Structure formats: C-alpha cells, structure tokens
Image (cartoon, grey):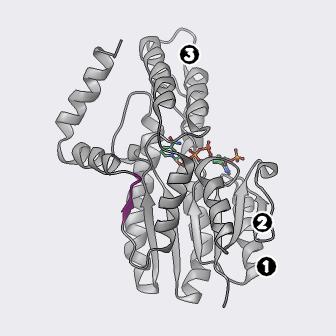
Amino acid sequence: MLKKIVAITGASSGMGLETAKLMAANNWIVYGGARHIEKIPTASNLHPVKLDVTDTSSNQNFINTIIAEQGHIDVLINSAGYGELGPVEDISMATARQQFETNFFGAAELTKLALPHMRKQHSGRIVNISSVGGDIYSPLGAYYHASKAALQQWSDILDLEVQRFNIRSVIVQPSGTRSTWGPIARQRILQNTNGDSTYTDLVNLMTTTLADNARGMSATTTDLAQVIIAAATDKHPHRRYFNTFHDRLTVFVARALPNLFRRQIQRSITQPKQ
Ligand SMILES: NC(=O)c1ccc[n+]([C@@H]2O[C@H](COP(=O)([O-])OP(=O)(O)OC[C@H]3O[C@@H](n4cnc5c(N)ncnc54)[C@H](OP(=O)(O)O)[C@@H]3O)[C@@H](O)[C@H]2O)c1
C-alpha cells in the first residue's frame, strides 16, 4: 500500500516535533521543516528539510522536495509559529508584519503550493495550528491574536473552496502547552517594549502571568500531537479541534458572551492575583 506523506512545519520543537515523531512511528513518511534543522531527528521515514516559512523560495523548496521524492502529499500541518507580544504603541510595524509573515502568510503560501498536488490526487488535508487565542485575547497580544484569528477565518473559507476536491482545511486550537512558546513570548515582550514605555505596569503583569501560567501548565506537546493527528486523519473532520473540554468552553463563552469575557480580562488587569 502507498505510504501516506505528511509535511509538518515547526518540526524542530514543541507540538510540531512531537507530531513528527509520533507520525513517523506510526508508519507515515514525514517531512519536517524548520530553520534549526539540526533539532529535527532523522529516521528512515523522518526527513528534516531546512525551512523558513517567511521565505518564498524556502517554501517552494519544501514542497518541491516532497513531490520530487514521493510524488504526492497527503497532509500539510502548519505548526510553525510564535508569539510576537508587546504593547501596540511600542511594537514596530516591521515586527508586527513579521508576526503575520510567520503565523499567517507562511501557512497560506505553503498551502497554496500544496493544493495543486492535492487537487490532482483528489484528496488532502490542511491542518492549521491556531490557538484558543484565535478567539480569546489578553493585553500585549494584539498581533499574535490577530494572526491566529486571521488564520481561522482563512481556513474556514479555504475549506469551503476545496471541499469539492475532497480536500479539507481544519483548525487546532491549543491553550497553554509546555514548549518554548512561553519563554520566546516573554522575551519578545521585553524586546518590543520601549525603555520609557507607558505600559510598564502591563508588561510586568503579563510577563509574570506568562511565567505563572508556564509553571501551572498541564497540557503536554504529546497531548497536542494526538489532537493534531486526529485532525489530520479523521475521516469526517471537524472545523475545530481542542485538547480539553475547558478549552472548547473558554472559546464558546468568549464568543457567546463577549462582554462577560471582556469584564473578566479587565478584572484580571486591574485586580491581579496576589
Ligand atoms: N505552546 C503553547 O502554549 C501554544 C498555545 C496555543 C497555540 N500555540 C501554537 O502552536 C504552534 C506550535 O507552537 P509550540 O508550542 O510547538 O512552540 P515552539 O516549541 O516554540 O515551536 C515553534 C516551532 O515553530 C518554528 N518556527 C518559528 N518560526 C519559523 C519560521 N520562520 N520558519 C519555520 N519554522 C519556524 C520553530 O522552528 P525554528 O525556530 O527551528 O525555525 C519551532 O519548530 C504555534 O503556531 C503556536 O502559536 C502554542
């Protein structure tokens, strides 16, 4: 039987790496892409490819390599991403654009490159790793949350366009998961805040909150890899995948009761936990 081929971005760390290892162990032929290719393990059916999703020629090379070596591509998992956090007034527009280049346009370009092959084979699945933050929000996350909200709308529209070719585009919405995402986001906040910033109180609050959340996090990248694999393989996929019922409920409440959600966030800023 023809082995199934999956392309995974962000395969050098976190949930992308875990998904790559798990799918390779389950007999998939895995192409893992990331800039730090040395962090992607090599195995007979796990192929690391150097990839910067913000670079068109790198994206073309990623998909072309898979097609040249395997002739088809069954699943594309867009996991590459990071949190470019910081106050809207302080963060530079170049930095804000870079967030969209990685979290949104990277996924969009790779999908565009994979689609003609998926259409030709009359099957395919695009799994986009968003966040509960595609629906909920907190201070200093304007560009991160906007990039994930954009990814979700884009995925839903893409899904409408390609379902007739037996291709589906779905979204996974993790919440806080133990990985390098948190430390990178904290670092970005500090880097993106001006020395004389008016927002130092919020910066202190959010960096402390991120550190506290990281200590209390129970979701692991293995948990998320399992959710991602379900999204990649379910015969009749859902539009949205969550790791826990609590994640699903949080998104539901934020959507259904926006004023209540807003008041809760506001309270967490004005009356932070001691
Ligand atoms: N962890 C969480 O709490 C959490 C919660 C909700 C959503 N998410 C989302 O889940 C996805 C995976 O996050 P994670 O937790 O696995 O984070 P992670 O451990 O920091 O991994 C991020 C991955 O993205 C890759 N990446 C970043 N920029 C890239 C670029 N320009 N080109 C190619 N690869 C790039 C990194 O590889 P290189 O640096 O080697 O290129 C790395 O492999 C992200 O989209 C994130 O926003 C995470």
Residue 85 location, x and y as percent? Answer: 51, 31
| Amino acid type of the residue that numbered disc 2 sits on in the rendered structure | His
Q: In the depicted view, which residue is nearer to us: 55 or 254?
A: 254
Residue wearing tag 2: 47
Q: Main secondary structure of the magenta part?
A: loop
**In this view, the mark in front (3 or 1):** 1
| Amino acid type of the residue that numbered disc 1 sits on in the rendered structure | Glu
Height in image: 148 above or below 143? Answer: below
Residue wearing tag 1: 69
Residue drawn at x 78%, y 56% as measured from the top left = 41
Residue drawn at x 57%, y 81% as measured from the top left = 118
Q: Secondary structure at mark 1?
A: helix
Q: Secondary structure at mark 3?
A: loop
Stretch in magenta? 239-243
Q: What is the CA distance from the residue labelled 3 to the residue labelled 1?
A: 48 Å
Whether disc 1's CB lies below 8 Å from ligand 1 is answered no
Residue drawn at x 56%, y 55% as measured from the top left = 105
Q: Residues within 10 Å of mark 2 (few under 14, many from 20)?
A: some
Residue 255 location, x and y as percent? Answer: 24, 47
Q: Secondary structure at mark 2?
A: strand
Q: What is the CA distance from the residue labelled 2 to the residue labelled 3?
A: 41 Å
The reply to whether the C-beta atoms of the residues labelled 2 and 1 are less than 8 Å apart is: yes
Residue wearing tag 3: 194
In the rendered image, residue 241 lying in the magenta stretch gets the answer yes
Residue drawn at x 81%, y 70% as measured from the top left = 44
Height in image: 94 above or below 66? Answer: above
